Amino acid sequence: MSYRTVSTGTARGAPRPSMSGASSPARNDSEGRSRALWLGSLLERASGWAQVVSRMMLGLVFGYFAVQELLAPNLWTLYVPVLKPTSALAVGAVEVHGWLLLMLAGSLVLGILPRLAGAVGALVMAEIVIALSVNGVNAIGMRDLGVLGLALAVMAQRESRWTISG
């Protein structure tokens, strides 16, 4: 048991048990190393799934926005650059964009050509970030910049679990 000196309530200099409950500094070191090895092992096992999780999360984001754009394209036409938001062409552009996002989402979630889907997704997100940044930096543009980064990471991944590549 390790001891420390406490000046309140004990004779001056009398040892008192520490609150840690550890029996020796050597045991503390070995427990610390054991915890570090356990955490390192856990992180190593989880890192094998990071590619799958990032790919699927990107697919879910694309899928969510695809459904939103396809169900209510009129709400999204104001984000179409150059075109008048009330025009049929703007509605058509949003619908095409929604179908593209839906195909990318399916490809990413199912693991079918995920690097290609990541590359196309990165191009789509780069276009969105550029279009949104024309009016200045805002929260939506920053969020989309993060999604662009995730798409680039998926594009850069080598083969991983649960994928079909050509």
Image: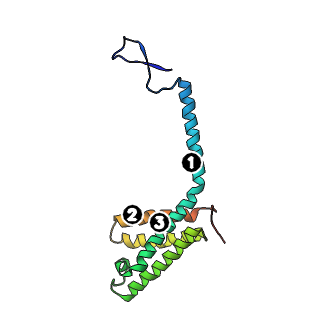
Residue 29 placed where, x, y %?
55, 29
Label 3 sits on residue: 148
Instruction: Answer above or below: position of 138 versus 73.
Output: above
Q: Residue at x 59, y 62 (%)?
A: 157
In this view, the mark in front (1 or 3):
1
Label 1 sits on residue: 43
Identify the amino acid type marked 3: Leu
Q: What element carries label 1?
A: helix
Q: Is mark 2 on a helix, strand or loop?
A: helix
Q: Residue at x 53, y 73 (%)?
A: 104
**Is 90 on the left-hand or right-hand side of 105?**
left
Q: In which quarter of the image is residue 32?
A: top right
**Is 3 on the left-hand or right-hand side of 81?**
right
Residue 119 placed where, x, y %?
55, 70
Q: Residue at x 39, y 84 (%)?
A: 91
Label 2 sits on residue: 142
Q: What element carries label 3?
A: helix
Residue 137 placed where, x, y %?
34, 65
Q: Residues within 10 Å of mark 3 (few under 14, many from 20)?
A: many
Identify the amino acid type marked 2: Met
Please tell me which of labels 2 and 3 falls first in the chain.
2
Q: Quadrant of residue 127?
A: bottom left
Instruction: Answer above or below: position of 120 versus 3.
Output: below
Alpha carbon distance from label 2 to label 1: 29 Å
Identify the amino acid type marked 1: Leu
Please tell me which of labels 1 and 3 falls first in the chain.
1
